[in-house]
Amino acid sequence: MSEPLQIIDADGSLTGTVPPPELDNSTLIQLYTAIVKTRAFDSRCMNLQRTGKIGFSVPNRGIEATSVGAAAALDASKDWFAPHYRDFGMLFYNNVSAESMFDNMFGNADDSAVGRQMPVHFSFTEPLKWLSISSPLGTQIPQAVGISLAAKMRGEDAVALTTFGDGSTSTLGFHSGMNFAGVMNAPTIFLCQNNQWAISCPSSKQTVSDGYAIKGEAYGVPSVTVDGNDVLAVYMVMKDAVAKARAGEGPTLIEAITFRLGGHSTSDDPTKYVPAAELEKAEAEEPLKRFRIYLINEGVLTDESADQIRTDADAEMLAGARAAETKGRPVLSTIFTDVWQEQPAHLKKQMEYCIQHYSERDEAVDENGEFPL
Ligand SMILES: Cc1ncc(C[n+]2csc(CCOP(=O)(O)OP(=O)(O)O)c2C)c(N)n1
Ligand SMILES: [Mg+2]
């Protein structure tokens, strides 16, 4: 495995290997804020889940720099995101509101999936082209290849980014997607978040190859490794990959080396299987602390302004969660809508029967029939 690109080390100092990317202060602060918001969202979700208000969440702690650095290299007005479920940072970087994310967590009437998806399975058409998160691993990978090829055939210069975990490289989606992108020279960027674990399966049991980047070789897809805890390094390798894809030079596989610092999900207890020493080492290398130190050293932030970003993020998450919690549930009739532009007669009949059925049972239904729970 080649040495992963690192620009800022774990202590927040420049490594000197390559100069940092030229980003203005407002972009640097946007990167930092998105990482902080992701962390604030995570802890709010944990509180909501532990108090029984939402059913489930997926901690993103540790992965934030990979997501945020990657998002910053795309043009959200035209590029496509075919994401993994540990990519909240991409949404926050693109100013998706916390409230609309909590709408999904609560599955309320304003949820873009009208409460039909699991929590954290976001889908957005605005302000970015964000495919619905899919529970079956790896399915987003060939979808991204198809989307980017379609854009190329239409003469658009959009690229598609697909992200996935180390464990997801064992899926058919990864191999068929990589092969197809290689053969078709598709403008797809494959970003593997190697967080060392796939639930309780360590990377050492996932593959015997020398990391994940090397898997690109078999498919003729150029590959690169990067320190996934270094937001500037992730941004830089992504920027290169995006430029190549736009220039017609085809796909790139990026392996971002990071660590899952929480449980797999709110249903998991990682202390049962992640060795304590491994976790301790990973905590020392985590992405937020080093970026904060770097930005303070560079005079972009002060201790006070950095603290203020966290305070504001916590307030935004609390307000977003409260707003989402008080919204009504999707109405029963929505079960029968959205698939057909014009509802077929048999579905209309079923809908009316369903609403009548619950009304007669004196359960909590309004005229459209609120979901009986
Ligand atoms: C096709 C498929 N197989 C198995 C699962 C069950 N499963 C859910 S998450 C997960 C681990 C995924 O690990 P990785 O791809 O490394 O992503 P991470 O959770 O570490 O971010 C597994 C095995 C699934 N959802 N889909
Ligand atoms: Mg993993």
Image (spheres, rainbow, N blue to C red):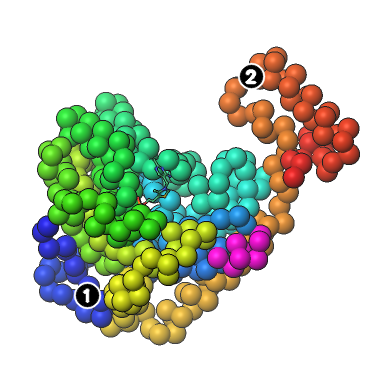
Q: Secondary structure at mark 1?
A: loop
Dot 2, crowdedness within 10 Å: few (<14), some or many (≥20)?
few
Dot 1, crowdedness within 10 Å: few (<14), some or many (≥20)?
some
Q: Quadrant of residue 225?
A: bottom left
Q: Quadrant of residue 236?
A: bottom left
Q: Secondary structure at mark 2?
A: loop
Please report the residue visible at 16 percent of the width from the left and 51 percent of the height from the top.
209
- Which residue in the protein does label 1 denote? 9
Mark 2: is the Cβ under 8 angstroms from ligand 1? no
Please report the residue visible at 55 percent of the width from the left and 50 percent of the height from the top.
119
Can residue 334 be seen here? The reply is: yes
Residue in front for this viewpoint, 359 or 250:
359
Residue in front for this viewpoint, 175 or 122:
175
Residue 204: x and y, percent? 24, 57
Residue 361: x and y, percent? 87, 36
The nearer-to-camera label among 2 and 1 is 1
Amino acid on which disc 2 is placed: Glu
| Residue 57: mark in rendering | none
* The N terminus lies in quadrant: bottom left
Residue in front for this viewpoint, 300 or 188:
188
Q: Is residue 139 above or below residue 326?
A: above
Residue in front for this viewpoint, 354 or 267:
267
Q: Which residues are magenta?
A: 46-53
Please report the residue visible at 22 percent of the width from the left and 50 percent of the height from the top.
207
- Which residue in the protein does label 2 denote? 342
